Amino acid sequence: MLCALVGCADSDKIEKLEKALQSQEELLRALQKEQVLSREAKDLLLSKGEEAALVRLKKERDDLKQSLQARNGDLSETAKLQNEIAELKNQLAVTGGGARVVERYENGKKKYEGDREDGGTRTGSWTFWHPNGQKWSEGTYKSGKLEGVWTYWRDNGKKRWDGSFKDDKRDGVWTWWDEQGNAWMTETYKYGELVK
């Protein structure tokens, strides 16, 4: 339930940021339109030779320039909003709209950390630790299955083995290291079957 709420909160935040961005862009378009109309009115008045109107139009132009310069500051806000929206959308794509979870050992050290989809399925990058704080394994899940490169370490920090998974099965070259950190064996797998 909490995962669903977190996913919804991200979606709501994206929607609010997109509305704020749209509002900023509409205001900018309105200011630019006013500037164009002001130029057209100036051209019309000049053809009639009305000098007082020219002075008024120059003042309007200067006011519009100041307003546009002030809006340039808002444009940087618009860029920030666009970046934040893109970042949230990217995060949602990786997590599937779920939530980041962290579990700890009784000693307070992290046990694991990763993302869960709304239904609780593991997805995205995950890291696991030994009780002493040394990294135990690290890799990626896709819809709850091991996918891509995974690396495993001993509790002394030395690498134990690494290799790739495809759809939760070993796939590709796997390498094993001894307790001193020396590679001592490699094997090749094809969709879970040892081929070499």
Image: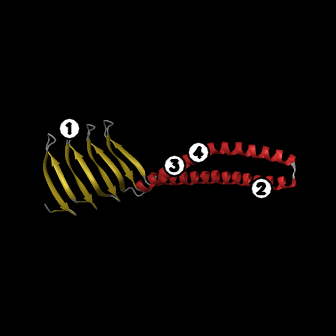
Quadrant into which the N terminus falls: bottom left
Gap between marks 1 and 3 measured at Cα: 41 Å
Mark toward the viewer: 1 or 3: 3
- The quadrant of the picture occupied by the C terminus is bottom left
**Residue under the image location 47 percent in, 50 percent down:** 87
User: Contact, CB < 8 Å: mark 1 with mark 4?
Assistant: no
Image point 29% across, 57% down: which residue? 146
Measured Cα–Cα span from mark 4 to mark 2: 30 Å
| Residue occupied by mark 3 | 83
- Label 1: which secondary element: loop
User: SS for tag 4?
Assistant: helix
Q: Which label's residue is closer to the chain start, 1 or 3?
A: 3
Name the mark nearer the viewer: 2 or 1: 2
The Cα–Cα distance between marks 3 and 4, rounded to whole angstroms, is: 10 Å
Relative height, residue 112 to residue 120 (above, below): above
Q: Considering only order in the chain, which callout, 4 or 1, is on the residue closer to the N terminus?
A: 4
Q: Callout 4: few (<14), some (14-19), or many (20+) C-alpha neighbours within 10 Å?
A: some
Q: Nearer the viewer, residue 139 or 21?
A: 21
- The disc, 4 or 2, on the residue closer to the chain's N-terminal end is 2
On residue 156, the disc is 1
Q: Nearer the viewer, mark 1 or mark 4?
A: 4
Is residue 81 rendered to the left or right of residue 65?
Answer: left
- Pointer 2 residue: 40
**Left or right of 139: which side holds 189?**
left
* Mark before the other along the chain sequence, 2 or 3: 2
